Amino acid sequence: MDRRRGMSLALIGALLLAGGLLASPGPVAAGEAVRLNLGASPPGGGWYPLMGVIAEALKKEFPGAVTTVGTSGGRANVALIGDGKLDLGLSSGTLASAAYQGREPYKKAYKNVLSLMVFDVINPLHMLVVKEAGVATMEDMKARKPPLRIATDQPGSTGFMVVRDALAFYGLTLKDFETWGGKIFYVPRGEVVSLIRDGHANAYFAHLATPASVVLELATVKELNWIGLSQDAIERGRKLGYVPGIIKAGIYPKVTRDVRQIGDTQAILVRSELPKELVYRIAKAIVDNAAQIGALGMSARFNPKEMWKEISSPLHPGAEAFYKEKGLMPR
């Protein structure tokens, strides 16, 4: 990390942790101060500086506002919003859908967790198998019962959930591969390349932003088959909050065709209890600062004309009113 970026993150942290005792969110008159509790990721994650920029945008929209932040990550942010401990937070579309419907990993439905916007970034599932293993399709996996040795994300993570769901569309589980003589390695991404290079693993299933450095390195180590999903599986994924995700031809070495997969969105979620006028102005503040948010990089890029289209829980009425008034959404 260079010195300037380190200083900017430190400044963001100071701004986010600034506190005070001001009024709780309610109908906001001009100049009235508000307090908003925001949820990001732990420091070092891409969502941490993103929420810092959003916090500053809100301070401009609401002079004197106090913003505090929780740094528990996307899965926890959803439940904290539902329980009234956060006002808005960053998470994923699949987690928003699971919470709203009361599905795993949540133990109850959070009908008060609504969508504010989604980013114009879709992170697709990557399912890579070393070519010499002879598995080229999901149908191969189901019919041949190959003893694949798969590196993947830790149980309980969002990435693990995506892998689990994709396999389930074909009636498969990770446990099946162990039953067939294979092995599952739940490892950090930094260990994947050595596992596959040394022959301990011969497949990698993970939910990643493209292009992922670990996959770029893998493509120089082994010849790979890129596994896609059927259109039926992708449509089944929509019911769980997934969106179509494409690994585009050329984004990785020797990927000569688009690979169709399920993907996930990055979303800002908000408590339904926040007043319509307040959420209208929160949406306005974020859109007015699109350039600053987009400058953070891929994890923060969004298109104001698209950010309501792939929501996984209902849109907050305040956000809907803003998008329609500004011509970003059909009336």
Image (cartoon, rainbow, N blue to C red):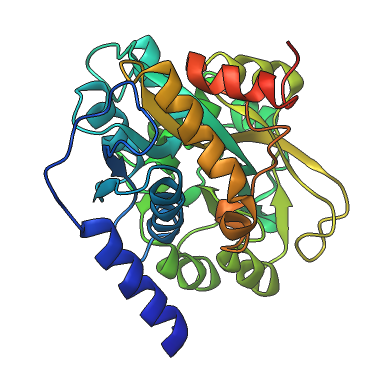
**Image spot of residue 19 (x, y percent):** 16, 53
47 vs 130, left or right, is left
**Image spot of residue 311 (x, y percent):** 57, 23
**Image spot of residue 9 (x, y percent):** 37, 72
Q: Residue at x 78, y 59 (%)?
A: 251
**Image spot of residue 227 (x, y percent):** 69, 41
Query: In the picture, which quadrant includes the C terminus?
Result: top right
300 vs 260, left or right, is left
Query: In the picture, which quadrant includes the N terminus?
Result: bottom left
Asked whether 64 or 293 is in front, the reply is 64
Asked whether 254 or 136 is in front, the reply is 254
Q: Residue at x 64, y 28 (%)?
A: 243
Residue 191 seen in the figure? yes
Q: Is residue 140 above or below residue 206?
A: above
275 vs 283, left or right, is left
Q: Residue at x 34, y 10 (%)?
A: 111
Residue 173 seen in the figure? no
Q: Quadrant of residue 254?
A: bottom right
Residue projecting furthest to the bottom: 3
Asked whether 279 or 80 is in front, the reply is 279
Asked whether 320 or 265 is in front, the reply is 320
Residue projecting furthest to the left: 21
Q: Is residue 299 above or below residue 177?
A: below
